[in-house]
Image: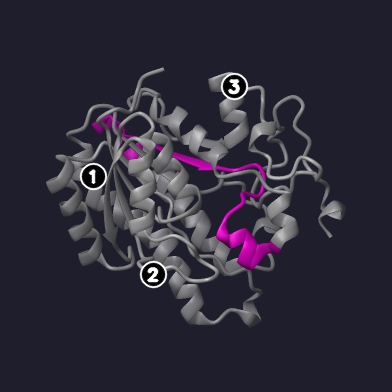
């Protein structure tokens, strides 16, 4: 498998969770990583900042650049990308990981929260991809990876949290359109989504607390899938909507998924948005909804 040594990654929302795990996995090869995120001060519920993330990336073996950045603002993204290029010389891989979530029905959804999710998720993905594009065009084997779900247009994925789903599927629509639009430039544009809940701050603070955290996998499974994706030839491997464990199994030959479980004594909780026809790899058992209560 090819190394990411010397590759330059621009990763949004990388102060913790999946974004940080992707950054650290690349760092193990000696990659250069720009950590673009809002968090500059830790809080009791949100540990990790752009600065602590940069330290972890460097400890993993990479070079890091901590950039406080709110991807809702074009000038901040432009400045962050320019800082990355000035420090490392370009951008090979753009990771659209930053996301806002609020699972509320329509009557409980404040418009400012809807606007936030659209601005971070859909518009932020479009904006970051756009600003990185001139440098990706110059890169060897360039990739845009977006952490967003397959476009499985079923009412169940929208009902009860329409605003969030619109904003999240908007990220996937960016993948759908840009993968075709940028094909002539040889830039791969793909989406990646976890089959199960992932042990992140969102799961702990918003979705399910301690029990759901224990029924989750670690962010490293998504990071390993992203790492495998970055090895693929950009000119031909594009426009894919991938589920983490299936991709690792079919393309990477992974058979041991137990190492990613937080608590093997509990069943794995399914994530949102995974299509019914997407079957887990052999030996992987996913909890029924009745087991999540």
Q: Residues within 10 Å of mark 1 (few under 14, many from 20)?
A: many
Q: Which SS class for mark 2?
A: loop
Q: How many marks?
A: 3
What residue is drawn where x is 68% and y is 54%? 213
* Residue beneath the point at 47% across and 68% down: 117
Q: Quadrant of the N terminus?
A: top left
* Mark drawn on residue 133: 1
Residue underneath mark 2: 41
Q: Secondary structure at mark 3?
A: helix
Q: Of label 2 and label 1, which has the lower sequence position?
A: 2
Q: Which mark is in front, 1 or 3?
A: 3
Spot occupied by residue 228 in the image (x, y as percentages of width and height): 46, 28
Residue 252 position in % (x across, y down) = 54, 21
Question: Residue 78's x, y, as percent?
Answer: 20, 58
Residue 180 in the figure: left or right of residue 116:
left
145 sits to left or right of 222: left
User: Which stretch is magenta?
Assistant: 180-209
The answer to whether residue 195 is magenta is: yes
N-terminal of the two: label 1 or label 3?
Answer: 1
Q: Secondary structure at mark 1?
A: helix
Residue 143: percent from left, percent from top: 34, 35
Question: Label 2 crowding class (10 Å Cα cut-off): few <14, some 14-19, many 20+?
Answer: few
Nearest the camera: 239 or 252?
252
**Which tag is nearer the camera, tag 3 or tag 2?**
2
Q: Nearer the viewer, mark 2 or mark 1?
A: 2
Q: Could you tell which of marks 3 and 2 lies nearer the N-terminus?
A: 2
């Amino acid at each position: 498998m090819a190394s990411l040594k010397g590759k330059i990654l621009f990763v949004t929302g990388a102060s913790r969770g999946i974004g940080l795990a992707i950054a650290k996995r690349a760092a193990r090869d000696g990659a250069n990583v720009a950590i673009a995120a809002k968090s500059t001060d830790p809080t009791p519920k949100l540990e990790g900042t752009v600065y602590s993330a940069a330290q972890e990336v460097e400890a993993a073996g990479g070079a890091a650049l901590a950039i406080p950045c709110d991807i809702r603002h074009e000038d901040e993204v432009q400045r962050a990308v320019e800082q990355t290029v000035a420090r490392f010389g370009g951008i090979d891989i753009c990771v659209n990981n930053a996301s806002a979530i609020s699972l509320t029905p329509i009557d409980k959804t404040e418009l400012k929260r809807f606007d936030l999710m659209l601005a971070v998720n859909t518009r932020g993905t479009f904006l970051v991809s756009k600003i990185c594009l001139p440098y990706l065009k110059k890169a060897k084997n360039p990739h845009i990876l977006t952490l967003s779900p397959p476009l499985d247009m079923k009412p169940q994925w929208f009902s009860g949290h329409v605003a969030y789903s619109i904003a999240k599927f908007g990220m996937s629509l960016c993948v759908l359109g840009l993968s075709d639009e940028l094909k002539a430039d040889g830039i791969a544009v793909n989406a990646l989504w976890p089959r199960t809940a992932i042990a992140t701050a969102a799961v702990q603070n918003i979705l399910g607390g301690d029990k759901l955290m224990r029924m989750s996998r670690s962010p490293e499974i998504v990071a390993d899938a992203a790492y495998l994706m970055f090895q693929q030839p950009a000119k031909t491997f594009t426009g894919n909507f991938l589920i983490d464990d299936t991709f690792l199994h079919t393309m990477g030959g992974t058979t041991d998924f137990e190492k990613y479980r937080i608590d093997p004594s509990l069943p794995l909780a399914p994530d949102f948005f995974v299509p019914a026809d997407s079957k887990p790899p052999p030996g992987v058992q996913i909890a029924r909804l009745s087991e999540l209560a």
